[in-house]
Image (cartoon, rainbow, N blue to C red):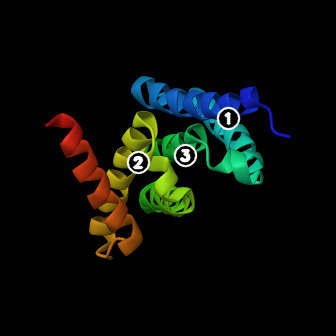
Amino acid sequence: MYRQDAINDTLTACLIATGLANYAIRTKSSQMMGLARKKHAAALHKLNTALKHPTVALKDTILVSIMVLGVFEALAGLGQLSLKGWIEHINGCMAMLKLRGRAQLSNPVSIEIFIHVSGHLQLSCMQREVPMDPKLVSMAQRTSRQVGRCLS
């Protein structure tokens, strides 16, 4: 069984790695970037462990963790590798959205996460000039109508 605090530890590890990378860039500290990369490796290990547990893999915090590591790649990557790393994380998020299915649209937090992730997915598809997965387009349209009704 995977512990709830281990799920939170995964997200925390991802946030720390990404925060350190941002700080390293702002301060131009190669030493801090080295630490950020070490923390990133540890965060990836925690995330990969979490993804091995089917019920844990579908949690909101795991999806957010993948997104946060995508930000790390965008910040700390090197040129085209940065873009490639971000796209890989976005593709991982796309797979998670598909696995989570309509159930993820049953609570406000999950809906907000879906909207955020699908926005990044749309950007990735536009950048690569590929169509978005029809299943996710349909879910996004339903979500948009649902949110629109709530705001009316």
Mark number for residue 114?
A: 2
- Residue assigned mark 1: 10
Viewer-closest of 114 and 102? 102
Where's residue 14, x and y in %? 60, 35
Cα–Cα gap, marks 2 and 3: 9 Å
Viewer-closest of 24 and 44? 44
Label located before the other in sequence (2 or 3): 3
Amino acid found under the numbered disc labelled 2:
Phe
Q: Nearer the viewer, mark 3 or mark 1?
A: 3
Q: Height in image: 47 above or below 141?
A: above
Residue at (49, 45) in percent of width and height: 67
* Identity of the residue furthest to the left in this view: 152
38 vs 33, left or right, is: right
Amino acid found under the numbered disc labelled 3:
Leu
Cα–Cα gap, marks 3 and 1: 11 Å
Where's residue 11, x and y in %? 61, 33
Quick one: quadrant of the N terminus? top right
Amino acid found under the numbered disc labelled 1:
Thr
Determine the secondary structure under disc 2.
helix
Mark number for residue 63?
A: 3
Determine the secondary structure under disc 3.
helix
